[in-house]
Amino acid sequence: MALRTQSVAAELIRLLYRQVPAVLAANLINSNLVVAALWQSHDQRVLVAWASAVLALTLMRVGLWTQYRFRPATDDADPARTARWGRYYTIGSTLSGLMWGASAVLFVQAGDPISLLLISFVLGGMGAGAVTALSNNLPAFYLYLLTSLLPLEGHLLVMGDRVHLAIAGMAAVYVVGLVVIGRNFNATLIRALTLNEENTQLLTNMEQQVRVRTSDLQASNALLTDARAEAEQANQAKSRFLAAASHDLRQPLQSMFLFASALHSHVSSKTGIDALVRIERGLDVLKGMLDSLLDVSRLDVNVIQTELTVFSLGSMLDDVSVSYRRIAASKGIELRCGPLSNALVCSDQGLLGRMVRNLVENAIRYTEKGRITLSTRLSGGCVHVEVKDTGIGIAPDQLGRIFEEFHQVGNPERDKARGLGLGLAIVQRLSSILGHRVDVQSTLGEGSIFSIQVPMVEGATTESPPPAAAAAPVDTGRLVLVIDDDPMVLLALGAVFEGWGYQVSMANSEDEALVRVRSSKVPNLMVADYRLREGKVGSDAIKGVRAACGVSIPSIILTGETGHECEVYAEELGAMVLHKPVTPNQLSYALERLLGKEGAC
């Protein structure tokens, strides 16, 4: 989309340079991780030389960023100078792409799947990050993708065997997907900035008319109100984009989660396993950041609507506990349940569940040893859901700020493994929407207790039995039908299910799924993406396959949508809904509950 004004062009360049610290930090961290992972298996002199080159380029780009910060204010009004700053940045990102492209040539060795796995995931992840970091300057975005990923593509083609050619094909599809998403992101951002400028100008004009035409004050006030509303809508354009683009943003991350899980059975060396674990931890951090950003964007644009129902609180808390028990155990923390009341409460089950999950995630981040306890307490006609941890605690002077966006306790270095500081802010906003009071008690160095007060519905209560831990799927030999229009996600899901011992049938549409079931046995399970091509949805595909087979096949719907539409259709079908990106642990737990509920097929 062509730029309309100099101010829009200058704003795009400002956004580009604003992300420089995060981009350069990612370059340094990833280069050090690559060197550490390959230190024992590759020429150490080559590793040091390559890492030194990355460091030198990073320092040069820091200098460029510093110069830009202290540029004359007149630069933003001069098209030639604005274009020059854009070219400088493009040169820096291109050189960075060359450095990372060189890593594929230097470190990917024939017969060494570990080096291929490591470099492919690093380059793929940084390519995905370039969508938000560089796509507001398309030349820099295209050149970075070309210089960083083309050498890997060529290296795979030169190897020439079937596996490497297949990987090269998947990499090409991934690059095309990044280009499409980047172009859409660029066009949306330009539209948002242009609309914001137009509305700002409109607001100025309306205010002038109000001052001049005092005799028509009522009409002028109405126009001014409309103009201000339009200007505010323009300021929220970026948040709307994040909320609306949730599906597209989650797709690459979803495929990376699944491929990483599928690779476990193919990696046997300690170095490879360690590298794969690091990749999965990085993906977990990225998933948490994306979930938080999209939740905040939905709250910013007021697209969240409550659906109050009466439900059993104990069952929901049991689900949360089981979902996070493995994550806590990976840090050496015990996540356990105290007494869980089966009291009937009135709330929005999805939003209340999000509040509890955020509190549990927050407790896991800030607890290094000990335990986290999820329990309930009855008082004054309400159920108090409590999350207690033995973590770092909160100082008294910080208690009033912990619910602010981006505020984090005990994280001055902004360690991204501890999230973005949005979890408690989301809890506070959802608390206001639902009318559920949130309280906190904490002692520095000893831990914290967060409590959500939920109104109870009159009725009998019983104590729920201790929750059972979720087990990974076993070799069932069952047939699963997977429906998804994204080739990367489809292949990844197929690889995960095959690794779990399932027979897999894959389709990219309802029509293809019907062809598959007519030529084979009835599937025991269906997994379908909600948003398919040509405006079709996965719930209709499930309905069509069930009708063709004459059996109510247990089904799971995967969705990146933020609205309630998918949940409504899924409830009608008796299907489970999982929100992307779905981790293998979450999928494993969903399969156990679904097949246990429906019985063996």
Image (cartoon, grey):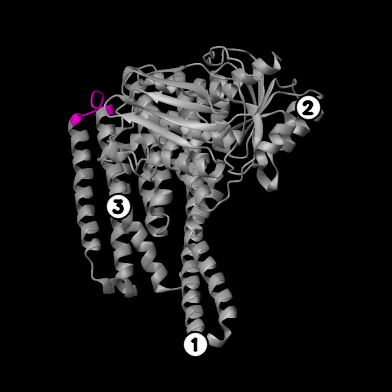
Instruction: Tell me whether circle 2 and circle 1 mark residues in contact (CB < 8 Å).
Output: no
Q: Is mark 1 on a helix, strand or loop?
A: helix
Foreground disc of the pair 3, 2: 3
Residue at left offset 74%, top offset 31%: 573
Q: Is residue 589 visible?
A: yes
Q: What stretch is highlighted in magenta?
A: 37-44
Instruction: Tell me whether circle 3 and circle 2 mark residues in contact (CB < 8 Å).
Output: no
Q: Position of residue 553 (x, y in %)?
A: 73, 23
Q: Position of residue 473 (x, y in %)?
A: 56, 16
Query: How many numbered discs?
Result: 3
**Label disc, if present, on residue 212 of the rendered structure:** 1
> How many neighbours does mark 3 have within 10 angstroms: few (below 14), some (14-19), or many (20 or more)?
some
Q: Position of residue 200 (x, y in %)?
A: 46, 72
> How many neighbours does mark 1 have within 10 angstroms: few (below 14), some (14-19), or many (20 or more)?
few
Residue at left offset 50%, top offset 35%: 355
Mark 3 lies on residue: 20
Asked whether residue 38 is drawn in magenta, I would say yes
Q: What residue type is labelled 2?
A: Arg
Instruction: Tell me whether circle 1 and circle 3 mark residues in contact (CB < 8 Å).
Output: no
- Vertical order, 213 against 10 (above or below): below
Magenta portion: prevailing SS class: loop
Q: Which amino acid does label 1 sit on?
A: Val
Q: Nearer the viewer, residue 548 or 458?
A: 458
Foreground disc of the pair 2, 1: 1
Quarter of the picture holding the C terminus: top right
Mark 2 lies on residue: 518
Q: Position of residue 108 (x, y in %)?
A: 33, 32
Q: What element carries label 3?
A: helix
Q: What residue type is labelled 3?
A: Val
